[in-house]
Amino acid sequence: MTQELSGLLMVALAVLALSGAAWGWRRRKASYRDWAEFFTWFDPEREVRDGQECLYVGTSEAGVPLQRVAVGPLSYRAKATLGFSTDGLVLETRGANALLLPYSPSLMAGRATWTIDRGVEPDGLLMVQWSLGPHRVESYFRMVDSNLEQIVSTINQASGADTQ
């Protein structure tokens, strides 16, 4: 086999792999398309308290930690701000409208060590379990210069969740 033929074969394999990855991502996004109707968008004219800079890591279906929810601003990892309003948690990822996670007994916070494609020190992630319409999901955040235990406690108290 010549060097040119080997090079062409490698390029063809790379194109095939990238095409397969793009096809898989489009299928995943299409499977979650209907979930977007359950979003509650936050009115930007309302007040947000205690906005905390964070890295939004991802959202997965509750109990299925490797199943990324790929819809709207939940699709991609991003720098974000997580704050509090009178109605719920406000998630504002860069380049997207702010999303409201309404307070309810189903909104609970805790700590986690890993999620979809991220592992950190023990209990280094903030995990927020909430309802997106009829679907239970878990969103994960890497907080920047924040007291994680205090944030967990504040979320659980505001939502009326019994657990810490």
Image: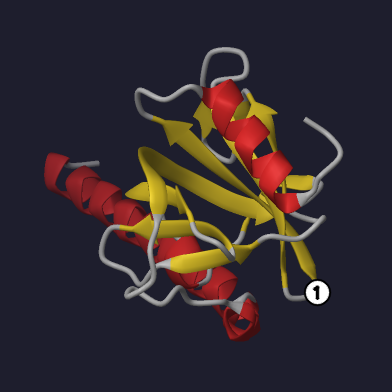
In the picture, which quadrant includes the N terminus?
A: top left
The residue singled out by tag 1 in the image is 134
Does residue 70 appear to the left or right of 18 in the view shown? right
Where does residue 130 sit, x and y in percent of width and height? 71, 57
Q: Nearer the viewer, residue 108 or 56?
A: 108
Where does residue 59 sit, x and y in percent of width and height? 59, 53
Say if residue 56 shows up in the picture. yes
Q: Secondary structure at mark 1?
A: loop
Q: Residue furthest left?
A: 4
Q: Is residue 94 above or below residue 46?
A: above
Say if residue 20 shows up in the picture. no
Q: Nearer the viewer, residue 59 or 162?
A: 162
At x 50%, y 59%, the residue is 85
Q: Residue furthest right?
A: 162
Does residue 5 appear to the left or right of 85 in the view shown? left
Q: Nearer the viewer, residue 131 or 156?
A: 156
Residue 70 position by quadrant: bottom right
Residue 142 position by quadrant: top left
In the picture, which quadrant includes the C terminus?
A: top right
At x 17%, y 42%, the residue is 2
Q: Nearer the viewer, residue 160 or 134?
A: 160
Q: Is residue 78 above or below residue 114?
A: below
Crowding around mark 1 (Cα neighbors within 10 Å: few <14, some 14 to 19, many 20+) is few
Where does residue 5 sit, x and y in percent of width and height? 20, 50
Q: Is residue 49 above or below residue 27?
A: above
At x 36%, y 49%, the residue is 81
Q: Is residue 72 above or below residue 38?
A: above
Does residue 96 appear to the left or right of 82 in the view shown? left
Under mark 1, the amino acid is Pro
Where does residue 23 sit, x and y in percent of width and height? 47, 71
Does residue 75 appear to the left or right of 86 in the view shown? left
